[in-house]
Structures are given as structure tokens and as C-alpha cells.
Image: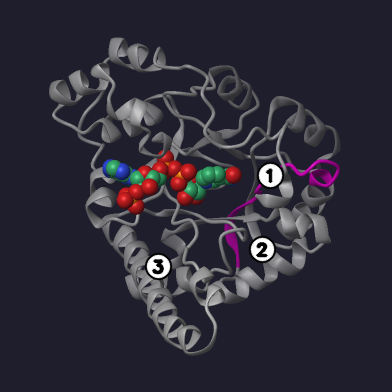
Amino acid sequence: MITLGELSNRSIPLIGFGPGIAGYSSKMQKKHAGIWRYYYGIINRIKIRVVRKNYIDAVTHALNIGYRLIDYSSAYGDGTLLQLAIQRSGVKREDLFITTRVSNWAQREGKVREEFMKFLKNMNLEYVDLLQFHWPVTDLYLDAWREMEKLYEEGYVKHLGVANCHQHHLEEIFKICKHRPEVGQFEIHPLFTQKPLIQYYKDNDIVVEAYTPIARYDDRLVRLPLLKKLEKKYNKTFVQIILRWHIQNGVIPLVRSMSKEHLLENFSIFDFELTQEDMAAIDAININSRLRYDPDNCDFSIL
Ligand SMILES: NC(=O)c1ccc[n+]([C@@H]2O[C@H](COP(=O)([O-])OP(=O)(O)OC[C@H]3O[C@@H](n4cnc5c(N)ncnc54)[C@H](OP(=O)(O)O)[C@@H]3O)[C@@H](O)[C@H]2O)c1
């Protein structure tokens, strides 16, 4: 396994795969009535089957390529499709690093344990490697943390972590925790480099994961002359260059793709190294442009 560093008792892979939500829309079915509802219902069911099949195929393919860190959340689904893909891939459980997160819904409803146990059952797992909360829901995330610590103490969780935490959230957790977070994820990409926050996590021995690591293929990066120049210099795509930049910064990128070509491309980043000058040039792209939500200013009920 290609690893970044040691957690308390095992290493963590250097790159992660986040399959996200297997999305489909049931809007079509709702809009129509009578005979149209019947036909559109059939079309919709076919669409759902196709989406589910593509999702399982993509996850299986990712595992076959060599991805071992799976980044998931109960906010994305119940894990059923993921389990099918893992089973199909034939990869051994002990070779995987499976992350899940407590949804905001479970924090609101006080169902952290219930949701987690359902995930374990659907995934046919005895433990997860990393449990995080999805967002630090105001007034609720410390209670969620206490529940997560219980699951850790009972052996269902190997490592505890956080997501979307600013420094002040972590300071509150440090005040009450029995077990400190070992891994934290938040939005990081060249348009939003978050250097001070990364440093704060590292100073507190927390491994940093980057979500939205390629800024969802943002057009501002696609068009950037610097990245075009680096593509030619290294004979790599700019996505590969950005993923490599994360790793050389000591950050684990969690990238999403449903495309077999992209999955392979994104994993083919271990045969080159960016120079310090090029690392600095990519750092300088930063314009503090956040693409996702600011945890201090968002509506947790829609996330
Ligand atoms: N904790 C949180 O609140 C949180 C929030 C957001 C994300 N996350 C995690 O981070 C993961 C990734 O974040 P993200 O989905 O926001 O953003 P991302 O990984 O930066 O971007 C994903 C998009 O980039 C495209 N893509 C991937 N590789 C590509 C390539 N080589 N060339 C061209 N396009 C490519 C994908 O399309 P294709 O399918 O066509 O490749 C997809 O549309 C999520 O799946 C999730 O696990 C966590």
C-alpha cells in the first residue's frame, strides 16, 4: 500500500477515492400523472439501475487500480452499493482503509450510534478504519464526538477524525476529548490553499486530507497558463500535477471520479516529482476561493 504516514497503529494511504453519492433523480416520475407516470416510471427505474451499475463498476475499478482509502459518509448513502463493489473487487478487508462520517441528520436526531451500526451492517464490516463527523453542526458536534469516542472504545472504530473544522472547532474538541482526532479533512485545492489551517492541523499531529482536491475541475484551473506549461514540462495532466502537489505538501487528496480513465490517470502520480519552484508557483495560484461551504456560515440542514 502506498502510504503517507503512521497513525497510532497503522499507516494511512497516500491518496483516497471518494465515490460520493450514487445520484439519480426521481423528479420525472413525480411530474407526470396517469399513463405518462407509468411510462416515465419505467424509464426512471432503468435510469436508477444504470446509475447503480456505473457506481458499482467505478468503485470496483478503483479498487482494482490500487486505491485503498475509501472516503464515504452516511450522508452519501447506506453503503450497500459500496459493499457490493468491495465484494466484487476481491480486495481483502485488512488491505482497505475505510472511512465513514456521521451525517448532520444523525447529529440533529441524536442517532449517531444507530446510523453507524446500520452502516456497519450494510457494509458487512466489524469495524471502520476512520470515523469522522461530516460537519461540526453548531451546538451538536461535541455530543457527536463523545458518541464517536464510545464507538472507538468499543472497538468498532480504529481511528477518530473530523471534517470541516476550523481551528476554533478543534480547540473545543481538545477541551472535552478523551481521544484526540488523528485525521481531519477540509476543502483544499490551488484556488484555496488553506496553508495556515493545514499548519495548525500538522502542529497538532493531525493528518490532513483534502476534499474537492482538484476543485471539481474548475475552469479557472483548466485555462491557467502556468498549469498548461507544467503539463508540458512533466508530460502529465494538470489534474495529476495538482494531486502530486497535495502529496508533496503532505496532504492526502480524496478525489472523486466515475470515469475509468480518470481513475487511472489520478492514480498515476507516483513516477514524477515537482520541483520546489513549481510547488511554490502552484501555491501562488491561491485566491482564497472556497467552492464548498464555510462551516462558520452555512445551513447544516441542507448538507
Ligand atoms: N466532508 C465533506 O464535507 C466533503 C465535501 C466534499 C467532498 N468530500 C469528499 O471529497 C471527495 C472529492 O470531492 P469533490 O467531489 O467535491 O471534488 P473533486 O474530487 O475535486 O472533483 C470531482 C470532479 O472532478 C472530475 N474529475 C476527476 N478526475 C478527473 C480527471 N482526471 N480529469 C477531469 N475531470 C476529473 C469528476 O468527474 P468524472 O466522474 O467525470 O471523472 C468530478 O466531476 C468526495 O467524493 C467526498 O468523498 C467531502
Gap between marks 3 and 2 measured at Cα: 18 Å
Badge 1 is on which residue?
Answer: 135
Name above or below for residue 116 compared with residue 158.
below
Point out the tag, 2 or 1, that comes first from the N-terminus.
1
Gap between marks 2 and 1 measured at Cα: 21 Å
Say whether residue 107 is left or right of residue 59: right
Name above or below for residue 72 compared with residue 24.
above
Say whether residue 165 is left or right of residue 246: right
- Amino acid type, residue under disc 1 in the picture: Trp
Say whether residue 270 is left or right of residue 190: left
Q: Which residues are magenta?
A: 127-142
| Residue plotted at (65% across, 26% down) | 204
Q: Out of 35 and 256, give the one closest to the viewer.
A: 35
Nearer to us of marks 2 and 1 is 1
For mark 1, give the secondary structure: loop
Badge 3 is on which residue?
Answer: 92
Badge 2 is on which residue?
Answer: 156
